[in-house]
Image (cartoon, helix red, strand yellow):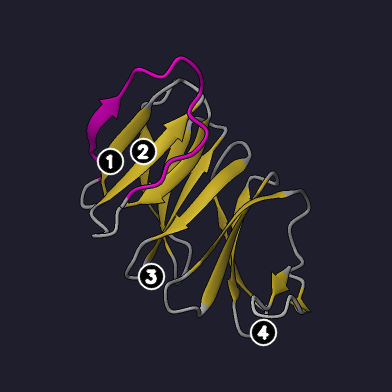
Amino acid sequence: RVWRFDDGTHLRTLEGHNASVLSVCVTSDSKHVVTASKDKKARVWRFDDGEPVHWIEGHDHYVTSVCVTPDDKHVLTGSNDKTARMWRLGDGVHVYTFEGHSECVTSVCVTCDGKHVVTASQDKTARFWSLDDGAHVRTLEGHSDEVRSVCVT
């Protein structure tokens, strides 16, 4: 659902997933909304009227998290299939798969400069990846339980 912040008015409902939506991200230009769902898909919508643009498909399990790059050109998704993936926002074409977690990827967050994505996992780690070439940069270890969310500044 889309709500107006200042007065709480319900504006529209984005309908199309056939399972629960787990994550939502709005592009920085407010032209698109991207949703992630238990139906193993992400979907790009037009923000102004809620019309669907296209599906993002390729994960083998729930899509748990979604984040858009600061330049609004790419979408990052995390999944219970233990991967994160990068897609082109405009047409949903797959760019990279980030593999290395041994458990579900619970959260993805792109750095403010748009150069890296950080992933969180039930394997008790967070990992940094390069968006230039998809390479693993480093693993952050030390949590005693799963890492459910990441945020970077």
Residue appearing at x 78%, y 53% in the figure? 18
Does the residue at mark 3 contact the one at mark 4 (Cβ under 8 Å)? no
Residue 84 x %, y %: 44, 41
Q: How far apart are the two marked residues, 4 and 1, measured between alpha carbons?
A: 34 Å
* Closest to the observer, 72 or 94: 72
Task: Name the kind of residue labelled 4 in the image.
Answer: Asp
Range of magenta residues:
134-152
Calculate the distance from the C-alpha at mark 3 to the C-alpha at mark 1: 18 Å
Disc number placed over residue 98 in the picture, else none: 2
Magenta-colored stretch includes residue 147 = yes
Residue in view at x 32 percent, y 70 percent: 71
Q: Is residue 111 above or below residue 91?
A: above
Kind of residue at badge 2: Phe
The x, y position of residue 39, in whole percent, is: 70, 46
Q: Report the front residue among 109 and 40.
A: 109
35 and 134: which is toward the camera: 35
Which residue is depicted at the point 54% across and 32% down? Answer: 81
* Local secondary structure at mark 3: loop
Separation of disc 1 and disc 2 at Cα? 7 Å
Which residue in the protein does label 1 denote? 129
| Residue corresponding to mark 3 | 72
Element marked by disc 4:
loop
Specify the principal SS of the magenta part: loop
Amino acid bearing label 1: Trp
Relative vertical location of residue 32 with respect to residue 113 in this rendering, above or below = below
Residue sitting farthest toward the top: 144
What secondary structure is found at the residue carrying circle 1? Answer: strand
Which label was assigned to residue 49? Answer: 4
- Check if mark 1's residue and mark 2's residue have beta carbons within 8 Å: yes
Which mark is on residue 21?
Answer: none
Judge left or right: residue 70 versus residue 83: left
